[in-house]
Amino acid sequence: MSTFTSTVIFFYGKLPLVLISIIPSSLRSYQMLHHLDTPVWMEIFVGLTRVLLFMLIIAWLSKNNAKELFRKEFWDRLGKVASIEMKRNWPHIFLAQLIVFLIFLYGLMNLLIQLIVGLSLVPLTGLLDIQDYDQESLRYSLVFFLKNMSVMPLSMVYILKMCGVREIR
């Protein structure tokens, strides 16, 4: 549970990470609203933004600046630290963390998102005056926005923490 809690605190405590995650979230939401009938550049931009987000998460978790990510020595140190952590945690702690990941980040977060969407869809469509779209498209759009703002980036942080990414000097 401490990995889960520290993951949430870490991600939402870093405003630049949250702001960057708005980009793929918004694009994914737009794609779902238009039944994925969108230009290919959107998919490429979503992927590139996620790579940037992932790299920044690694930099901040390891307490290094982004320039370090372009050095072989950094990746060698990261690999050694992660290897030691995996050996130390295998199998009991690793499996426990995996179970917490599946239950909380995958199961409960998705359930919470479905609940939020169910409760907020009608008020949001009225507030934003977007009744012209079919309800199913709006529903998927909101679900994918929320997933890309929560489940996706939190999964990145959680898995990196599980693998032992931490301060590397």
Image (cartoon, helix red, strand yellow):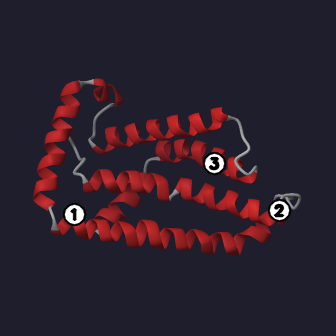
Along the horizontal axis of the image, is 31 left or right of 51?
right
Along the horizontal axis of the image, is 124 left or right of 6?
right
Task: Find the distance from the CA under tag 1 to the CA under tag 2.
Answer: 43 Å
Q: Give residue 94's mark.
A: 1
Q: Which residue is drawn at 51% across and 58% down?
A: 150
Q: Does residue 169 appear anywhere in the picture?
A: no
Q: Residue 141's image quarter?
A: bottom right
Q: Which residue is drawn at 39% across and 51% down?
A: 156
Mark 3 neighbour class, 10 Å CA radius: few under 14, some 14 to 19, many 20 or more = many
Residue 49 is situated, as x and y percent measured from the top left of the image, at 52, 37
Mark 2 neighbour class, 10 Å CA radius: few under 14, some 14 to 19, many 20 or more = few
Q: Name the residue under label 3.
A: 28
User: Is 113 located above or below residue 83 in the figure?
Assistant: below
Task: Find the distance from the CA under tag 3 to the CA under tag 2.
Answer: 17 Å
Q: Earlier in the sequence, mark 3 or mark 1?
A: 3
Task: Find the distance from the CA under tag 3 to the CA under tag 1.
Answer: 31 Å
**Residue type highlighted by circle 3:** Arg
**Residue type highlighted by circle 2:** Asp
Q: Earlier in the sequence, mark 3 or mark 2?
A: 3
Q: Label 3's element?
A: helix
Q: Give residue 134's mark.
A: 2
Q: Earlier in the sequence, mark 1 or mark 2?
A: 1
Q: Which residue is drawn at 60% across and 49% down?
A: 25
User: Is 66 located above or below residue 121 in the figure?
Assistant: above
Q: Label 1's element?
A: helix
Residue extending farthest right: 132
Q: Residue 74's image quarter?
A: top left
Q: Label 2's element?
A: loop
